[in-house]
Image (tube, helix red, strand yellow):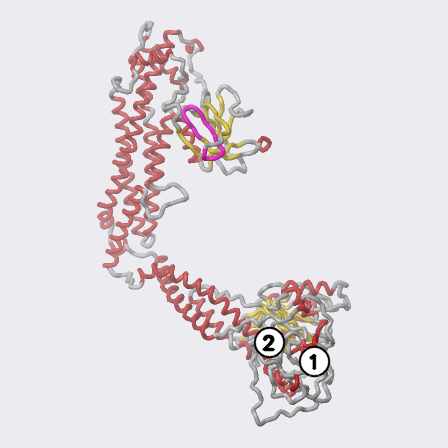
Amino acid sequence: MGNRGMEDLIPLINKLQDAFSCIGQSCNLDLPQIAVVGGQSAGKSSVLENFVGRDFLPRGSGIVTRRPLILQLVNSQAEYAEFLHCKGRKFVDFDEVRLEIEAETDRITGSNKGISAVPINLRVYSPNVLNLTLIDLPGMTKVAVGDQPADIEHQIRDMLLQFVTKESCLILAVTPANMDLANSDALKISKEVDPQGLRTIGVITKLDLMDEGTDARDILENKLLPLRRGYIGVVNRSQKDIDGRKDIKAALAAERKFFLSHPGYRHMADRMGTPHLQKTLNQQLTNHIRDTLPGLRSKLQSQLLSLEKEVEEYKNFKPDDPTRKTKALLQMVQQFGVDFEKRIEGSGDQVDTVELSGGARINRIFHERFPFELVKMEFDEKELRREISYAIKNIHGVRTGLFTPDLAFEAIVKKQIIKLKEPCLKCVDLVVSELSTLVRKCTEKLVSYPRLREETERIVTTYVRERDSKTKDQVLLLIDIELSYINTNHEDFIGFANAQQRSTATATINNKKRVMPNQVIRRGWLTINISIMKGGSKDYWFVLTAESLSWYKDEEEKEKKYMLPLDNLKLRDVEKGFMSTKHTFAIFNTESRNVYKDLRQIELACDTQEDVDSWKASFLRAGVYPEKDQVESEDSGPAESFSMDPQLERQVETIRNLVDSYIGIVNKSIRDLMPKTIMHLMINSAKDFIHSELLAYLYSCGDQGSLMEESADQAQRRDEMLRMYHALKEALVIIGDISTTTISTPIPPPVDDTWRAKDPSPPPQARPLPAAACIPSRPPAVRGATPGPPPANPPNPAFALGPRPGPAVPPGLPPGIPRRPPAAPGRPTIIRPSEPSLLD
């Protein structure tokens, strides 16, 4: 006993699953579900049992299936069943399965015909089934019985729609032959969810229970209410057969005998019965598999192409070959040096489009971060003037000075030059940090050899740290050189005469510009944060010059929104809002005036903190300095110490101008020498070390064999890659074999299914058999539409009363059904009175 109809597909599915299991993937064929829909006692459960080949579903009169049964069939060597609600328990006796279904149904719905949408999940393992999902649904009913609710019809309908609306669900519309087809609930619901008829197969049951003298030939020949996939007749076991333990094998033999012996069906017996229904569904599954194969093949081919380049390196790979290890070591060190240099020089093969890295970040340190740190020292004007005043007074001592002392200038200048040490050393530290990050990124390609990577990173990082110390010594030496001699004869130094003239000028000292007034310092997008009540935040294109800050609608700079002069402006940090993702700073007026419209300050936002720092550096170049709280020292002198006489005030102003001029010269020199010093002593030296000495240091670390020892992960990855490569090739071959050994049957052409768009009232389907060979006239509406193209030679009406030339193919036969050959000459067909003509 078993499902012979599905056994043809089992080897095919097993081949596919074996091929995919070799590469560690699931064979996602997504085979369709099969839902059996129909009225009560239409024979739905019997149709399902024929697929499993086992008798295990509850039987009886009235509504027996009162909960959806989701039946999962799993191809397995052993045969048993499991319930989801009874995990771990295996049912070998299928009579126990039936009792468990009945008990589980009563547990939820009660014993008085109640229904529930909560499904019962049953999994059947058998060597005679495919991996399919079958759904046994409650039969549609009209009248509530027992404890059933009044809206039982709508409840069952909603339950059915949950399953049959899925595009991957095949609908078996089951209708008993002893009821009018026009009243079929199954056809009605299938018409709603499948108007094209692509998923619906009509199943006519209980053909053996029709009234004597009637048959369902018009339906089975697809003449009455035609379906695109036609109808298939089946004969299930009766309740008497089930009670008498008639097995399914004997029932199938009786079904076959019925169709061969019945005068109205024997001419189409080869396309009737449960085996043909299984064959039809098998072909549908085969079509689905063939439709899925191109996508699977494309997926495997793309994976194969992506692996070929890497596999090429491993085809002749010998892990323990010393020659290979030496060659690999040389290649790795050489590649590391090339990658390091490319990342510094900016000519890498893979350009990072997400963030700055390597040489670009070092360049930013040189030309944005370091100048920003230098300029930040200049804005404490009040403290500087106090120091100059104290220096002048201390140099004069008890005497009243008539001239501006040089020593005060030198003392203040040297103090300002010493302050340069901190930003210079910070610049070196930032570059060292970037180089360490760069080395770590370059060693990522050595991940296959963990000890080699570890040693390379250690050696290069140690060398960079050594150069860090020497570079800092050189930077401090540059500062000491500047301190050793104050060159007042420098061509850019203004001198005492010009300083005195400048001190009498009316220009504001605090907002000096070192760039041309109209020179553009920076352009870019910024967000102005304004409250929602005043218009909300907006993005504008900003242009910063030495005199003003302007913003435009866009980068074309045609529609100017506002121009803000930079006089008396300062910068202020603003905390990022709770919901904001941007970083913010503000511009405000030191004289408490409105900056823009009625705003005392403008909040400008950038995407990153680096952009904020860069904009701040640009504002410093324009003379807009950050805000700094001025806290008076507790030990500061009395109030009268800040009140200077006019002569002392002129001397302070003169020295202030001289200091500003000379510190500008020193800053210019330091900004030029710092990048050169770091490049020469650290970066270029590190590149030379990697190219010339790194290999020698690696050889001195110890055994070369242990240095080039592969990581366990890499060895496993290589083995898996080779296995995957060969498995992919094998899977592609198997898929090719399946494609050539299976046959895809096209979907039958559309039929005249206008009845699915409206509710016609066809004549009764049961008709009395004619008493003679004369063909009674039949209204054209009963004939239905003939699927497919019209016959080339239409039948001649003159032969309508003559004998039938063998079992000819009826007009309603769907394409793809094998046609029986005509009767051999010399063997005339004897027409019995009880057998109608096929031309009818």
Question: Which one is in front, 335 or 418?
Answer: 335
Q: Is residue 258 left or right of residue 299?
A: right
Give coordinates of residue 581: x percent, y percent: 50, 38
* Residue 790 disc label: 2
**Residue count near mark 1 (Cα–Cα under 10 Å), binned few <14, some 14–19, many ≥20:** few
Question: Which one is in front, 737 or 672?
Answer: 737
* SS type, badge 1: helix
Q: Residue at x 26, y 55 (%)?
A: 328
Q: Residue at x 53, y 24 (%)?
A: 600
Give coordinates of residue 193: x percent, y percent: 64, 64
Q: Residue at x 47, y 27 (%)?
A: 572
Quarter where residue 642 is shown: top left
Q: Residue at x 39, y 7 (%)?
A: 646
* SS type, badge 2: loop
Q: Amino acid at mark 1?
A: Gln
Which is more foreground, mark 2 or mark 1?
A: 2
Q: Residue 541, relative to residue 628: is it above or below?
A: below
Question: Which segment did they paint magenta?
Answer: 543-556
- Gap in Å between the C-alphas at discs 2 and 1? 44 Å
Q: Amino acid at mark 2?
A: Pro
Give coordinates of residue 91: x percent, y percent: 59, 73
Q: Is residue 151 left or right of residue 335?
A: right
